Image (spheres, rainbow, N blue to C red):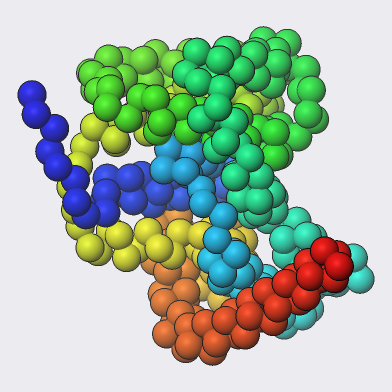
Amino acid sequence: MEKMEKKGRNSDIELLRILSLFMIFWMHGAASAYGNKFGEIAGILISVIGNMGVACFILISGYYGIKLNIKKMMHLDLMLVFFSWLSLLMQFVWGKPVGGETILSYLLPVIGKQSWYFTCYFALVFLSPFLNEVVEKLGEHRLKQLLVTMLVIFSVVTTVFFFDINEDGGKGVVHMTMLYLIGRYLGVYKTEKVYETKKLVKIFLVTAGINFMLNLALYLVSGSVQNRYARDNSLFTIIQAICVFLIFRNIYFENQRINRLAKHVPAVFMFEWTLRVAIVTYVYNYVTCADKWYYVIVTLVIAMVLIVVGSAIDWVRIAVLHRPETWLVDKVYTVGEKIVKDIGQKINI
C-alpha cells in the first residue's frame, strides 16, 4: 500500500497534544476525589491514562527533533513570564501569603521551576544539539542498546522495586532525555515503518489493564490511592505513551482549527492551576462535591473548560502582545549577538 504524501501539518499529532493536555487536566482534577470508592477507583483509572500525557509531549518532540532556536525560546520564555506574573498578581488579589522565595520563582519561572515541565524542557532544548548528534553517530543498533539500558536503570527498576534512582518520579531532565531519545529513535530509524494499529491497541489495552489492576490492588490493600505503577517513569506509562503516539501517527488528516488550538497548549498548561483557583473562587467550587460519585464527571467538564478558557486568554495575549514581544526579542537578540561577537573577537586577540 502506498503511503499518502504528507504536505501539511499533521493534525493527528496536534490532536494528540490537545488530548494529552485534556487527560492531564482531568487527572489533576480527579486526584482530589475522596470519601467514595467509586471516585477513587475512577481516579486510579484516569491517572493510568492521563499520566502518559507528558510522555506523549516529549515523544512528539523527539520524533520531529528539537532544533535549538534562541528566538523561539525567548518567545516561549516571555509567554511563561506573562502567565507566571499574572499568576503572582492573582495570588495578591486573593490575599494568599507569598514568601520571598516563592515570589522569585514566579518572577523567574524557568529558573525558579514554577513549572517542572518547562524547566526541564528548557534544559532539554539546550541539550538537543548534542542528543541529536548522539542519535546519528551511535547508529540504530547502539542507540537501541542505550535505550534498553536507560529503560532498565530508570524505569524497570522503579516499576518493579519502587526504588526511584532519580528521586523525582520521572519529573526530571533524565526521564525527559530518555523519552526524547526514544522519540528520535522512532523519528530517525522507524519513520517509514508502519506498526499495525490493531496490535498497538491490544498492547495498549493490556498494558493499561495491568497498570490499573496493580494500582487497584495497592489501593485495596493499603486503603489509599497511590498510583505507583502509573507514575511518569513507570514502564507501563512509557509503553502506553509509545503505543498511543504510534496509533496517532498511523492516522493522517489536516484540520486548521485543531492546529490553531494546539498552538495554545503550552500556555494553557502553564496557567492551569491559576485558572482552577479562579474557577473555584468566582464561578463554581467544584471541590465541594469531591465526595460525590459524579465528581469525576464534573472534573471532566472542568478540564474542557480550562482548555477553552486558557486558549482564549492566550489568544488575547498573542493578539495584544505579539508585535511588541517580537520587537523586544529582535532587539535583545541583536544586542546579545553583538556582545557574544565582541567577546569572541577579544578572546581570539
Instruction: Please tell me which residue lies in front, 259 or 224.
Output: 259
Specify the farthest residue to the front. Answer: 349
Specify the farthest residue to the right. Answer: 100
- 108 left or right, relative to 334: right
Residue 172 percent coordinates (x, y): 71, 39
Task: Determine which quarter of the picture holds residue 219.
Answer: top right
Q: Is residue 242 something one can see in this rendering?
A: yes
Residue for point 55% across, 38% down: 132
Quadrant where the N terminus lies? top left
Residue for point 86% across, 67% down: 349
- 248 left or right, relative to 271: left
Residue for point 67% across, 27% down: 226
Instruction: Please tell me which residue lies in front, 13 or 323.
Output: 323
- 192 left or right, relative to 204: left
Instruction: Please tell me which residue lies in front, 150 or 237.
Output: 150
Q: Quick check: 77 above or below 339? A: above
Q: Quick check: 14 above or below 243? A: below
Q: Quick check: 210 above or below 25? A: above
Residue 193 percent coordinates (x, y): 28, 22
Q: Quick check: 89 above or below 297? A: below
Q: Is residue 213 something one can see in this rendering?
A: no
Residue for point 69% across, 53% down: 119
Task: Determine which quarter of the picture holds residue 149.
Answer: top right
Residue 177 percent coordinates (x, y): 63, 35
Residue 275 percent coordinates (x, y): 56, 67
Instruction: Please tell me which residue lies in front, 348 or 107.
Output: 348
Query: So how many labels did they put on this image?
Result: 0
